[in-house]
Image (cartoon, rainbow, N blue to C red):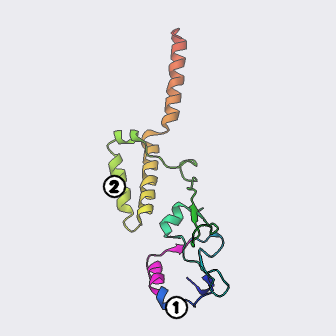
Amino acid sequence: MSETEKEGGVPRCDRLIDAFRDVVNMCSLRDLGFKGSIFTWERGRTRQTYVRERLDQFLADVGWCSMFPETEVRNLPILNSDHAPIIASTIERRNNMWGGNAFKFKPLWLSNNECSGVVSKGWAEGVDLGITQKIALCGEKLGSWAALSFGSVRKNIKDKEKLLKELKEAGGGG
């Protein structure tokens, strides 16, 4: 959206792109950057008619950037079109309060009547947040609540299996 993003042709009239810039600012979007050529569109076969511009880009809001902080955008070479293909690769953040694993809702939690209240409370606390932050907040609340309410289910199962094995061996039923 700047003059450095165009080479050749008639200079871009700033007022034609002002409305787009206003929307980008109003929505608090930011350019995710790129690897590869800055130019995503080209036209012309001679030096006098050749024009190239950065017309295509990835824009994202704060919620997207916090969910996918490692997003990488690649502008690929222009081959069979006048536009370059653009690919955005995302890597989900895996470092969180649950020991490095991504949050996963456990159906077992629904067996406890408090579960829906935890979600409702988390959602209400995030009244001023965007949708992605509200979901993350609910996930944090559920994770903390589940750790207190259920403990480590996998560890509990292993402990009970060990106890059962010991009881069988002690009773001669092994």
> Does the residue at mark 1 contact the one at mark 2 (Cβ under 8 Å)?
no
Q: In this view, does 169 lie above or below 22?
A: above
Extreme residue in the front direction: 45
Quarter that holds the N terminus? bottom right
Badge 2 is on which residue? 120
Give the mark nearest the N terminus, 1 or 2: 1
Residue 36 image point, x, y percent: 66, 69
Give the quadrant of residue 37.
Answer: bottom right
Residue 2 image point, x, y percent: 58, 85
86 and 34: which is toward the camera = 86
Secondary structure mostly seen in magenta is helix
Specify the amino acid type for callout 1: Cys
- Marks 1 and 2, how far apart at CA: 50 Å
Discs 1/2, front: 1
Q: Is residue 35 above or below residue 51?
A: above
Q: In this view, does 101 lie above or below 132?
A: above
Identified at 53% across, 74% down, the residue is: 30
Specify the amino acid type for callout 2: Ser
63 and 33: which is toward the camera = 33
Identified at 43% across, 46% down, the residue is: 105
Identified at 47% across, 44% down, the residue is: 147
Reply yes or no: does residue 22 show up in magenta. yes
Q: On residue 13, which mark appears?
A: 1
Q: Give the range drawn in magenta.
A: 18-31
Give the quadrant of residue 82.
Answer: bottom right
